Amino acid sequence: MAAVIEVEDLYYRYRDGTQALQGLTLTIPTGARVAILGPNGAGKSTFLLHLNGIYLPQQGKVRLLGRSLDGKNARWAKSQVGLVFQDPDDQVFAGTVWEDVCFGPVNMGLDAGEVERRAGQALRAVGMEDLRTKAPHHLSYGQKKRVAIAGVLAMSPSVIVLDEPMAYLDPRGKDNLLAILTRLHRDGTTVVVATHDVDMAAEWAEKVIIIKEGRTLAEGSTDLLTDPALVEAAELRFPVVTQIFRRLGNMLPPPHPKRVEEAAQYLRTLLEGHHK
Amino acid sequence: MHIPDGFLDARVWAGAAVMSAGAVGYAVRRTKEVLDDRQVPVMGVMAAFIFAAQMINFPVAPGASGHLLGGALVAILMGPWTATLLMTTVYTIQALIFQDGGITTLGANILNSAVIAPWVALWGYRALKRVTGDGAAVFLSAWLSLVVAAGAAGVQLALSGTVPLGVVLPAILGWHMLIGIGEGLITGVAVRFARQNLPPALDERWV
Amino acid sequence: MCMTADPMVQGGGETVLHRVEARIKVVAMVTFVILTAGMSATPYLLAALGIIGLLAVIARMPVRLLAGRLALVVPFSVLMLVVLPFTVPGEGVALAELGPLALVATREGLLQAQVLALRLANGVLAASILTFLTPFPVLMNALRGLRVPPILVTLMEFTVRYLFVLADEARRMQLSRQARDFRPRGFLWHSWTMSTLAQMVGVLFIRSYTRADRVYQAMLARGFSGHQPVRAGARVKASDLCWGIGITAAALTLRMMEVGGGMWLQLLK
């Protein structure tokens, strides 16, 4: 699978001296569902801001669709990579839902008709078309989140990156969001999620990238989430499903399942064997 | 100190409006030169901060409470021109949307609270810093900024023939000398706290 | 400052007045306030109040809302209105005894207070009809159209957007302190109370500032470059102009009659 984003030996240091990234290297495959995990302070947020050219590499490279990001193509990068920030109140700033969703397309210099078409489509994609005239402060948290996503979708990015998307959502809100992400992925968008939620990562991701202290600790399939050494080193914990099977220890041979469906399948096979 | 409509005579409010329009116009130009337009979102959120901070009440005397005005706080932390723009924004919204302060008197209210108060605070702070040390300078200049701004409002009311100067000035100055202590204390602690805790990556623009 | 009065809540349905173009509404209301704020004859002030009442009826503005706006009038003005009768020199008409203090209310003082109260009511009600008739985003766009510096309008839009977010944050901070039994005690010189409140302001400053930076970055992420395009306002129709001119002319007529009446009286003397 071709890579939409390649990061090579990326370094970033803040003016106060904090070295946030020190040699980060990773690959995001085109059309994949990718989860980035790592403890607080691992450099996730700093890294995300590199993906669409808000921060430019001080050292190393970020390649987007084969082009190395620099000051000249930073604007293009913003139309290719959509960032959804953790707190929708940070992102949804305009007076009405509609104006906020139009913000990105207008910045891209699109004509009025195209702006409207895209904004309408984006609002439909997140199921918010009926609330377009509302002021953001009249919306629920989950609704604001969906408006934030629509504001990014309206720019038709090839990659959409969400920082901790599930935080503070109620169960229904989480289901809604997962459905949106699934649809986006089905329609060909690469979806990247930075999260602490190992259960979500285990259920949803195709590829997992684990970051610590500004470096890549590991990248690979969701099997990484059940690797005891890695989980310990990255200050993560096992997915709940895995925890149950690990408790049963030697009774059940590894590899232990990490997703609900996997676990069900595992138990089904086990039980069928038992009944025979 | 929101002077309502009808309390100022046409010459006074028109004069004050001309003066504050000049000052705000200059602040707009200065802000464009010193900060680029891209800082506007940051300033907008900070104007909302002033609004929110004005909602925190402190007890002054039995049955009476006051709240921070914030002109000195933003003038000392973010510079006087930024302070003028932020306070102008706050007072305009209060007049236009919440009917707190009049429409004809908006110019006078801006002159007092968005021009006089921040500038008195800044000058006072600069002059006192060497003599009294930083903490006391913040307290005194914030106190002074409130008293001078209130005095200006009193003079405008008297010039309009609304109340005799001998009545309005002692009353308005007395009250503001008292709540000015609150303004001074809160500004003093908040300025020190903000300087100690502002993430270093952020503070280089203004502070 | 009362935050329960949400300026964004729009009253009822669409009326003829709601549909008048926003710039016209702003100009008409400001002119109306300028003209009536200068009047000092009670009958004319009452007539102006009558016009406001008529407009409120046409706009189907709930009486409750109008009364609420009046009740919000800052204590400052109420205090002045109470003090005035006793401080303006003139012929004594009433005596109030507060213990050892004997206060004489003068006829001039009472009249002054009455005139100021009427002007105040005119101003507050006219402005509240304007906000009732015009949704906030539309009002801001009208200000842009009226050549208010764009930076100020943008600042106002941001302020109203984040006002609720930050006020909420302040409220949460206050609640969590209350949960640990903090309550304002004593007065200005109660150092525990004052330093706690001051730190809250300091924390709110830091939080606002870091939030401001995140907002800015989120805007950059969507390609913000410092310029916000001006949206076109609606076109002004003849009927809009009629309303604008009508409201302005009514106020102007009252004002002229008042001035004229004064001159007439002088001529008679």
Image: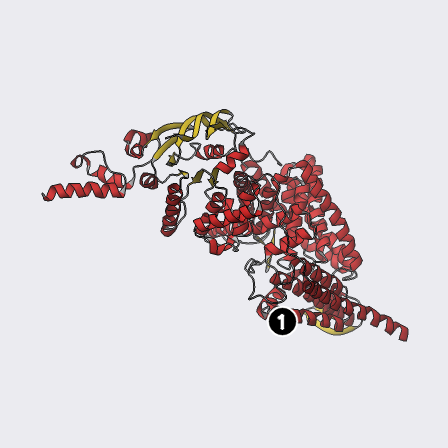
Residue type, mark 1 in image: Val
Q: In this rendering, does residue C145 appear at all?
A: yes
Please state the total of marks drawn on the protein image.
1
Q: Residue furthest left?
A: A276
State which chain disc 1 sits on: C
Q: In this rendering, does residue C40 appear at all?
A: no
Where in the figure is residue A118, as x and y percent of width and height? 50, 46
User: Going by the image, does A204 lie left or right of C240?
Assistant: left
Q: Which residue is mark 1?
A: C57
Q: Residue at x 18, y 43 (%)?
A: A268
Where in the figure is residue B74, as x and y percent of width and height? 63, 43
Q: Nearer the viewer, residue B51 or C254?
A: C254
User: Going by the image, does C32 lie left or right of C156?
Assistant: right
Q: Residue at x 41, y 26 (%)?
A: A25
Q: Residue at x 84, y 70 (%)?
A: C260
Hey, which quadrant is residue A214 in on the image? top left
**In the image, is residue A167 above or below residue B97?**
above
User: Going by the image, does B116 lie left or right of A137?
Assistant: right
Q: Residue at x 36, y 30 (%)?
A: A1
Secondary-structure class at tag 1: helix
Where in the figure is residue A143, as x and y percent of width and height? 45, 51
Q: How is the image coloured?
A: secondary structure
**In the image, is residue A93 above or below residue C76?**
above
